[in-house]
Image (cartoon, rainbow, N blue to C red):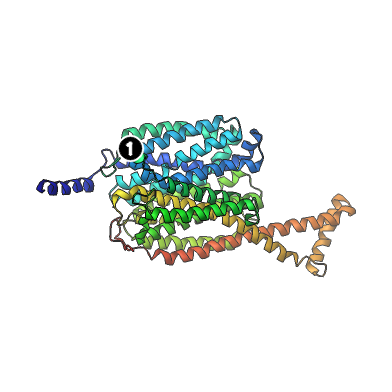
Amino acid sequence: MAATTAEAPTEASLHEHWKPRVNPWLIAMTVALAAFMEVLDTSIANVALPHIAGNLGASTDQGTWVLTSYLVANAIVLPLGGWASSVFGRKNFFLLCITIFTVASFLCGIAPTLPILLLCRVLQGAGGGGLQPMAQAIMADSFDERQRGLAFALYGLVAVLAPSIGPTLGGWITDSYSWRWIFYINIPVGMLTFLLVTRLVDDPPWIKADRKNLLNIDYVGLGFLTLAMGGLQIMLDKGEENDWFASNFIRIFAVFFVVGIIGLIVWEWRQKKPLINLRLFRYKNFAVCCFLMMLVGGVLNASTVLQPLFLQQLLGYTATKAGEALTAGGIALVIVMPMAGYMTNKFSARNLAAAGFSIFAFSYYFSATHIDLQMSFSYASWLRILQVFPIPFAFISITNAAYVGMPRSESNQVAGLINFVRNIGGSIFIAVTNAVVTNRTLWHEARLQNHMQDGNIFFHQQVQALSSFFSGHAGAANGSSMALSSIYNQLNQQAAMQGYQDVYMLLCWMSLAMIATAFLLSKNRPGQGGGSVAMH
């Protein structure tokens, strides 16, 4: 009995003082490379869809399944890292994900038909789903609490920068070479990452692998998760294309999502060994972090999509040039991310998060009131810098706060759930903001058309002036119709611009609400990830 009593503190001490055998920054850069490769693939194929569809003899609508198939598989695997690590060990699971992702990338590149490409994208998404959370969990365990903020700055740079440069890189590769190379470029990166992880990364002593857990998988929970995430992603990705809930197709997948998510919550909460440990949400701090991270992922992804669309649809930019307008924001992130990581040692997480959301609110208010149809490329670049500047402060502080008071043995589950909600928030906000732009544009069109009446003196004068101008170039018979066409084009552009302004203002109001929510976080001491957390 005495021996047992003496051994327990020794094992606990080993867990408490465990450190990786190599410099943790080498580990961080290695796993960040793998995560970067995966996050990049969530957006790099976007601009190549018309080329993919045309080359494989498919319609553009069918081509969008290249994105949807990846996101569905990715969303299903994201929260499963805790269970998979208990089966294979975290390092082995990470290596397995790298292997699957790399091989699937090669198969995507050589796919001769769209169905085969979609099957390979599902495989690629499944492999990629484990890379983000495992990379974050490895970073969390490799650094002590005082350095964790800086480590998460590197991870944040990956998570935020990769989606920003993905469309630009994808457009350049597709225009310069072939769409197949957007998948081939993963192969050397995957091979290098596999070699580095094998040499540098080790599992900490609290990661216990047992192959028997493979047979004890929670099949019911996995089924509910698949139903919920498949329903949600397909509903969001295809909703606008099918007129949302006016379509039976969308309503069916909405039902799948509702049934799946309710079943998942009820079932997983009652299991002794759940696939996803939902009991972590009893920690108030973790629950608040998940909610805030979902919103951060939402506003991040929404702004990354909104500005390029605005530049392409209303200012006539090419996809590549619109992506280049985001480049300045990426450079700003490289500078600001380490600063924000350093500031975690100086300020509590909730204060940093509140500061980030305050700047978010200002940046979106400025965007709503200052975008116009004469916006220059340099102005668009500065606007992007303003939009991304607050991201590091919110992202790093929330990620760091998610581990406050959590058992180290749950780091895999924490990482999986934090990344899961961030990705879900991004998918939801992209779909919602696009729908709001469309609906508000139609509303503004109807309002502006009320002024286009013969009784409106200004409208009448404008028609006469344009008719005279066009008559001198195309003849009197065509002058009037060309004048009306020009005015309606201007009206449509003006209405669309106001639709974008409305969405930015909506994001501003949401950011203001997030400031108050940030103060629900426990006030951890700066520079420390630990601390007491309320548990309800």
Q: Is residue 283 above or below residue 156?
A: below
Depth order, front residue of 273/77: 273
**Residue pointed to by mark 1:** 211
Relative image position of residue 210 (x, y in whole percent)? 31, 39
**Can residue 254 be seen from the camera position used here?**
yes
Instruction: Please name whichever residue, 443 or 413, is drawn nearer the observer in this view of the structure.
Output: 413
**Would you identify the image quadrant in which residue 505 lies?**
bottom right
- Point out residue 306 in the picture as x, y percentages from the top left corner: 58, 53
Residue 179 visible in the snapshot: no
* Percent position of residue 94, x then y: 38, 38
Foreground residue among 30 and 283: 283
Q: Quadrant of residue 25?
A: top left
Q: Residues within 10 Å of mark 1 (few under 14, many from 20)?
A: few
- Which residue is rendered at x = 32% and y = 58% of the image? 346
The image quarter in which residue 279 lies? bottom left
- Residue shown at the point (85%, 50%) measured from the top left: 473
The residue at 14%/47% (across/down) is 4
**Mark 1 residue element:** helix
